Amino acid sequence: MTNNIHKTALVSKKAQLAEGVTIGPFCIVGDRVVIKKGSTLISNVVAGGTTEIGENCTIHPFATIGLPPQDLKYKGEPTGVKIGANNTIREYTSIQRGSVGGDGLTTVGDNNYIMAYSHIAHDCIVGSSNIMANAATLAGHVLMEDFITLGGFVAIHQFTRIGSHAMIGGLSGINMDIPPYAIASGTRAKLYGLNVIGISRRGFSEETIKQLKKAYKILFREKRTLKDALKKIKTDFPEIPEIKHLVEFIEKNTRGICR
């Protein structure tokens, strides 16, 4: 199997392309770019910096991957981007390289669907199986876990964390951590309950959903401090992975928890 590189594409001889890579018209691929087997840059895609694109990714026109971060402190240091396998990255999306103020690396996991005009800033960590709807924006150092849905035009403040299986409504502004399994929405987002439909579709058992509902009520609906609520959950609840993850996520927060 050979690569299919359009005659108008500018691909550095130093770039590393695995078998079965397709580079369409007017793409630009820089010296330190690695593209793995089966991935496609449809047309007019720019991939620069120290960038790795995993297997079977499809990147649509006018997306930019690995260009310098929008960070006034950045002075050209050799930071990078690492993207996993089976990702779809739609038109005009930007995924920028890391900064020396973070870990120097922006990472995206596997099986993500990133819609048009989305932005993933420097030093973000995006997990796997997430959906970012049109123009969803992650500022620097954002952590997204797995199986998250961001609505259109969602804006997430730097250093904020979004827990796994959360769902955020369109046009929301997120400036505090969103706990796992929750639904959040609003210009200054508030919680609107457990993402029951989402976690049911992903195969959570009835017992697990029942326990998460009880934990959510204790954390966010009863008049308790977070410290007291977490203590009660750790004392009274069965040891199931989802409850443990919820508790640990909240205990690690530094920006505050959306409530």
Image (cartoon, rainbow, N blue to C red):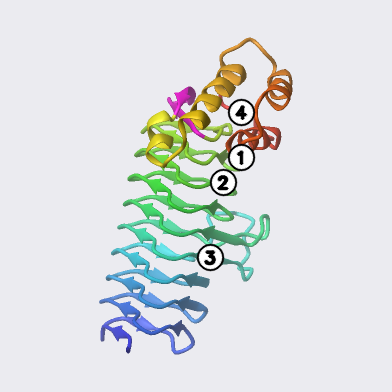
Badge nearest the viewer, 4 or 1: 1
Earlier sequence position, callout 3 versus callout 2:
3
Q: Mark 2: few, some, or many residues within 10 Å (few <14, many ≥20)?
A: many
Marking on residue 257: 4
Badge nearest the viewer, 4 or 2: 4
Q: Label 4 to label 1, Cα distance in Å?
A: 20 Å
In this rendering, the answer to whether 27 lies above or below 212 is: below
Q: Label 1 to label 2, Cα distance in Å?
A: 24 Å
Earlier sequence position, callout 3 versus callout 4:
3
Reading the image, the residue beneath label 3 is: 81
- The image position of residue 181, as x and y in percent, is 50, 33
What is the magenta range? 181-194
Marking on residue 142: 2
Quadrant of the snapshot with the N terminus? bottom left
Residue located at (67% from left, 24% from top): 233
Asked if the residues shown at circle 4 and circle 2 are in contact, with their CB atoms under 8 angstroms apart, the answer is no
Q: Mark 1: few, some, or many residues within 10 Å (few <14, many ≥20)?
A: few
The front one of 241 and 163 is 241
**What element does badge 4 sit on?**
loop
Reading the image, the residue beneath label 1 is: 241
Badge nearest the viewer, 1 or 2: 1
Earlier sequence position, callout 1 versus callout 2:
2
**Picture mark count:** 4
- The image position of residue 3, as x and y in percent, is 33, 86
**What element does badge 2 sit on?**
loop
Asked if the residues shown at circle 1 and circle 3 are in contact, with their CB atoms under 8 angstroms apart, the answer is no
Q: Amino acid at mark 1?
A: Pro
Marking on residue 147: none
Residue located at (47% from left, 39% from top): 165
- The image position of residue 167, as x and y in percent, is 43, 35
Residue located at (54% from left, 59% from top): 107
